[in-house]
């Protein structure tokens, strides 16, 4: 790979935010076409099912990069929707070996909720120095996530971060185009009782297996039992970016997406479109920079390759105290070696 050149990471952060602003505007306009057109299946890849609204956002990404991405910052694009085996670089014609950066993104994370106007989706993007096949989530230096709102929302949030620098968060008032600072406040609670703490179990596959581990975890911690225990509330936000946002805003205290474990038990294989992929969790850096703990189920840093097919099991804690308390019990429930 080409030698990594010095880069203005703050400028890169702004560029990712501008790209996502363009996606937001275009997707909002496209919604006038109606749910039927946006929700039609446009294709099925090894990464995921692609819907009509996804195709719209993918075209925006490629056109915007061609027009606005600095030519001196050659990059490879890793994105849901790029055909299997296809290599996309900017400037066009640049070999992967000549690129300095790798951009991984999910133009719309939470497509299903957005296309039926149920709940906001998120546009996710992250940038890492190019290391070829050796790149992992741990290499990400810049990340941005932008809310793609439902039709009734009057404000949208945008969060971005540079590793070691912190998070910038703003709220855009749509009718006036005015931006204001947004305060992030991850929960400081030391347990999850009387709060939201969820295992991701969006689909029929693996739901029973995951629910058993979820109940077992709360029982092991003494927060649930035969006599009712303490109330712990469940929220199924079908968007990894949305789940991170809920941690960042103090709405949720704990999220576990352990679907790859359940699917392995069902014999569905290590890579399945039903699971979280690296592009879904590429903005974990933002939560980490805000003080949340986002790690693998084994408690170790996320090191999945920057591709579109690897299944990722991850756990998010609102703070370090929750990670210390819940993490060991979770690993026991999953029968993982202690870290």
Image (cartoon, rainbow, N blue to C red):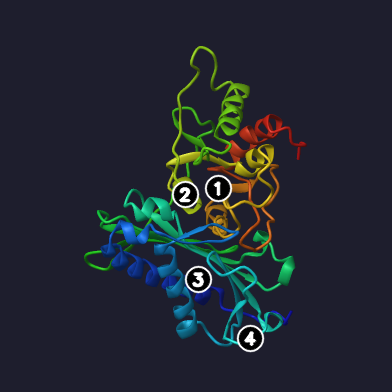
Please say if the residues under marks 1 and 2 sit with CB atoms less than 8 Å apart: yes
Count the marks: how many? 4
Answer yes or no: is residue 1 visible.
Answer: yes
- Position of 187 with respect to 308 (left or right) is left
Q: CA distance from mark 3 to mark 4?
A: 23 Å
Residue pictured at 61% horizontal, 39% vertical: 323
Determine which of the numbered discs, if any, sits on residue 13 in the image.
3
As drawn, the residue found furthest toward the left would be: 175
Q: Which residue is mark 2?
A: 248
User: Along the polypeptide, which appears first: circle 3 or circle 1?
Assistant: 3
Q: Which residue is mark 1?
A: 292
Q: Position of residue 250 (x, y in %)?
A: 44, 43
* Quarter of the image where the C terminus is located: top right
Q: Position of residue 337 (x, y in %)?
A: 77, 37
User: Along the polypeptide, which appears first: circle 2 or circle 4?
Assistant: 4
- Disc 1 element: loop
């Amino acid at each position: 790979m080409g030698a990594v050149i010095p880069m203005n990471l703050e400028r890169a952060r702004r560029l990712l935010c501008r790209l996502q602003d363009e996606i937001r505007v275009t997707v909002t306009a496209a919604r006038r076409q109606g749910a039927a057109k946006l929700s039609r299946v446009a294709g099925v890849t090894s990464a995921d099912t692609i819907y009509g609204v996804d195709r719209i956002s993918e075209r925006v990404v490629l056109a915007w990069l061609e027009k606005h991405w600095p030519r001196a910052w050659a990059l490879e694009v890793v994105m849901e929707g790029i055909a299997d085996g296809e290599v996309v670089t900017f400037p066009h014609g640049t070999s992967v070996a000549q690129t300095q950066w790798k951009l991984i993104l999910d133009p719309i994370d939470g497509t299903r909720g957005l296309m039926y106007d149920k709940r906001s989706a998120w546009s996710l993007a992250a940038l890492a120095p190019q290391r070829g096949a050796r790149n992992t989530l741990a290499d990400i230096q810049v990340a941005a996530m932008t809310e793609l709102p439902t039709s009734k929302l009057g404000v949208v949030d945008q969060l971005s971060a540079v590793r070691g620098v912190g998070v910038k968060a703003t709220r855009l008032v749509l009718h006036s185009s005015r931006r204001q600072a947004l305060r992030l406040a991850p929960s400081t609670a030391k347990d999850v009782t009387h709060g939201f703490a969820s295992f991701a179990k969006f689909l029929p596959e693996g739901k029973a297996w995951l629910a058993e581990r979820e109940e077992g975890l709360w029982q092991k911690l003494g927060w649930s039992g035969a006599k009712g225990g303490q109330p712990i509330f469940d929220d199924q936000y079908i968007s990894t970016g949305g789940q991170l946002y809920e941690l960042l805003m103090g709405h949720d205290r704990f999220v576990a997406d352990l679907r790859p474990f359940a699917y392995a038990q069902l014999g569905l294989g290590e890579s399945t479109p039903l699971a979280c992929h690296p592009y879904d969790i590429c903005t974990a850096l933002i939560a980490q920079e805000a003080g949340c703990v986002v790690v693998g189920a084994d408690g170790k840093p996320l090191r999945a390759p920057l591709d579109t097919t690897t299944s990722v099991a991850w756990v998010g804690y609102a703070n370090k105290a929750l990670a210390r308390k819940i993490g060991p019990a979770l690993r026991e429930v999953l029968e993982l070696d202690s870290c």
